[in-house]
Image (cartoon, rainbow, N blue to C red):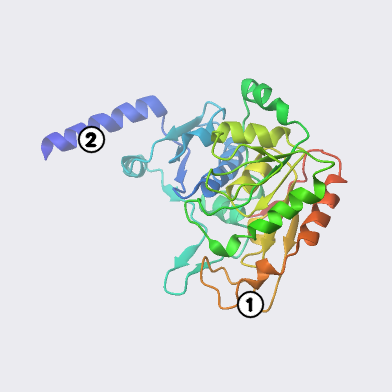
Amino acid sequence: MIADQLRLWTWGVHQVFRLGRPEVAFAFLGGLGDELLCTAPLVEWLDRRAGPIWVRTRCPELFAGFPAQTRILPDDARYHRLALRLRRPFRYLAYSRYDSEHDRDQPPSRHVIAEMCHRAGLTGEVRLRPHWRIADRESAIAQRWQGHLAIQTSTLTAHVPMPNKQWLAARWQAVVDRFASTIQFVQLGSRDDPPLRGVADLRGRTSLRETAAVLYHARAFVGLVGFLMHLARAVDCPATIVYGGRETPALTGYSCNINVTCTPACSPCWQRAHCDYNRICMTEISTDMVTTAIERLLARPRNPLRVDTASL
């Protein structure tokens, strides 16, 4: 027991010497989308403080290129206890609670990024967007996708797969077919996502960093609520998102996107898989609705996107 305590004390001293005493420490430890959203409170803290900021994560790739005072920690619970010994609370940024009995997420009372910033101890005005740092080498390699329309057909390989977020695979193909004569498509996502004809197929062939670089150069992104939606926003890639009615863009999305919604009486349900209404909030979204949204998006100039804010 004494030897274990000595080893832990020695480890802690080494970590403080290596990392510095943090201004704040936080983590989410969820899926890729939620981990990426942690960059929002990170950047807000970086703008307010000069001292070290600890971020515990399962995916360090998401935080590459951030300023030197960002200390990226592995998923090791000892850092939580060390922060407490240093009189720095370790804040967990989970913005909702899952009710397994009713298969329902409890939605926050404000945008998920605003809630995460609040839980991170921030006050004042905060920006409701994630952030990404693209290296010059990554950008140069992905330049070949300049002007393509990036598309995604499923999010069922996510950390928490949600069937209630899915749109019909045949309708994704109909979208591609509608624009086939004028637009080149590149398909992103998992290799298990429904494949599309007439596209450049990058499913399962790009790293997170490479995927971000493709979106950075793409003319726009078309997909579902999830990681790639947030990643597109992080690199200022405009998007058309098939939102349906499970949740609302006001709480989880971005007003700079064109969000295709459907809000029957049962919406928003915030349920992940269970549905008593045959997922009408998704099935009633037609191909025409999505193609019209894409046309509206493409009519806009490809400028930096508008940034929503919230006051805490």
Amino acid, disc 1: Cys
Amino acid, disc 2: Leu
- Name the quadrant containing residue 5: top left
Residue found 70% across the figure and 34% down from its top: 216
Identify which residue, 267 or 309, lies in the foreground. Answer: 267
How far apart marks 2 and 1 lie (CA) works out to 52 Å
Q: Position of residue 263 (x, y in %)?
A: 70, 72
Q: Position of residue 268 (x, y in %)?
A: 63, 71
Q: Disc 2 designates what residue?
A: 8
Residue found 70% across the figure and 40% down from its top: 199
Identify which residue, 71 or 155, lies in the foreground. Answer: 155
Q: Disc 1 designates what residue?
A: 266
- Name the quadrant containing residue 243: bottom right
Quadrant (top left, top right, bottom left, bottom right) of the N terminus: top left
Instruction: Please tell me whether mark 2 sits on a helix, a strand or a loop.
Output: helix
Q: Residues within 10 Å of mark 1 (few under 14, many from 20)?
A: some
